[in-house]
Amino acid sequence: MTDVELRHLAAMAAIAEEGSFGRAAARLGYTQSTVSQQVAALERAVGGQVFDRPGGPKRVRLTPLGAVVLEHGRELLAKAETLADAVDRFHAGDGRIDIGTFQSVSNVILPSVVRRLRDEQPGCDIRLSEEEPDQPQIGDLDLLFYDGRLDGDVEHLKLLDDPYLLVAPAGAFPDGPVPLERLDGVPMVAWPLICDQLLMEQAVERSGARPQVVFRTAVNDALLSMVRAGMGSAVLPWLAIRGADVSSDDRLRVHELRPSLPSREIYLHWRAGRVHSPLAGRAMEIAAEVAAELAAEFASQAAGP
C-alpha cells in the first residue's frame, strides 16, 4: 500500500464519476493511456482490480475492492486538498503568531501592526502577551518587543530611539526646555527601577540633579494621574506620552530636557536562526514601517512650526 499515490486515487475518482477512462482523461488533462497506467499502478498496489471494464460504450463499474479503495481514497484526497489549502494560506500570510510586548508598544506600535496584518490576512491568529520583566525570555514567542537588547541566543532589529521628556503640572516650569539641574530636589513620580528606568535615573544623577521620587508604579496612566494631582513631575519616554495623548490635556505640560537624556531604544527580538513564517516576517516589516512613521512624527514635532 505504500505505492499508492494521490494522483492514482484522483484518476480513479474521476473515472468513477465520469464512467469512462476517456472522459476522465479529458477532465484531468491527461491522455487516456496515462490514466490507464495510473489505474494499473493502483491495482498493483492494492492487489486486485478496482474497475470492471465491460468494453464498448458501457460505463465502467467499481469492483467490490474498488468501492473500498474509492471510499477511503476520497477521504485522503479531501485531506490532501485541505492540507494544500492550509499550506497556500500559510505562504500567503495566514496562520498564528505569538508576540511579546510592553506598555508603550502595546499602546502605540502594536495597534497599527495588528490592524494592518488583519487587513491583509483576516483569518490570521495573533496572540499577544504583555509583561514588564527586567530579564524577559523569548521562550516560544515568535517576536518580542523590548526596550533594550537581550543577551543570549537571539537576534534583533532596532526599531527606533524613544526620547525622554519631562511631563509636569501646568505652570510648574516656564514654557520651553527645562535644564536637568532644575530637577534637583523636585518631587517626581517614576517607574520602578527595571528595564531602562535605572539607566535613565543614573543619567539624571550624573547631570548633578537628584529628584525626590515620591511614588513608583509601572502603570503609565497611574503616573500621569499623580502628575495631574500635583504629586510631582515625571520623566517619561515619548511613546508613553504619545500613547496617553498628553498633549490634549491642559492640566499637563511636556518639556524637552537640556541636556537631553540618552534615548530609550526599542528593539524587536526573535530566536537566532529561526525560520520566520510569512506572517511573522510581515509583522516585522510592518513594525519597522510603523516605527519609521513614529520617528518622523517626533522629528516633526521637535522641529516645531
Image (spheres, rainbow, N blue to C red):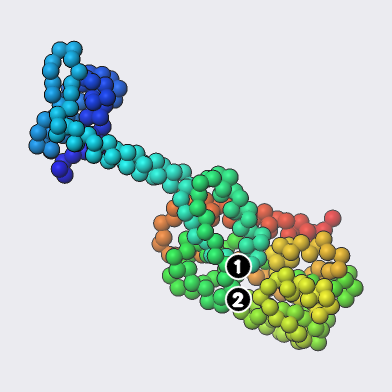
Q: Secondary structure at mark 2?
A: loop
Q: Residues within 10 Å of mark 2 (few under 14, many from 20)?
A: some
Residue shown at 32%/38% (left/top)? 78
Residue shown at 62%/62% (left/top)? 106
On the image, the x and y values in percent for residue 222 come to: 73, 73
Q: Earlier in the sequence, mark 2 or mark 1?
A: 1
Pointer 2: what residue? 195
Task: Work out which residue is located at the far front of the displayed protein and give it.
Answer: 64
Amino acid type of disc 1? Phe
Mark yes or no: residue 32 visible.
no
Left-right relation of 55 to 213: left
On the image, the x and y values in percent for residue 56 come to: 15, 12
Left-right relation of 163 to 42: right
On the image, the x and y values in percent for residue 265 come to: 62, 68
Judge by depth and name the residue closer to the eye, 134 or 81. 81
Image quarter (top left, top right, bottom left or bottom right) of the C terminus? bottom right
Mark yes or no: residue 35 visible.
yes
Q: Residues within 10 Å of mark 1 (few under 14, many from 20)?
A: some
- Indicate whether 277 appears above or below 45: below
Where on the picture, by quarter, is residue 108?
A: bottom right
Q: Please give the label number shown on residue 102.
A: 1
Amino acid type of disc 2? Cys
On the image, the x and y values in percent for residue 99 come to: 52, 61
Residue shown at 59%/54% (left/top)? 113
Q: Secondary structure at mark 1?
A: loop
Image quarter (top left, top right, bottom left or bottom right) of the N terminus? top left
Q: Please give the label number shown on residue 25.
A: none
Judge by depth and name the residue closer to the eye, 293 or 73. 73
Residues marked 2 and 1 touching at CB (< 8 Å): yes
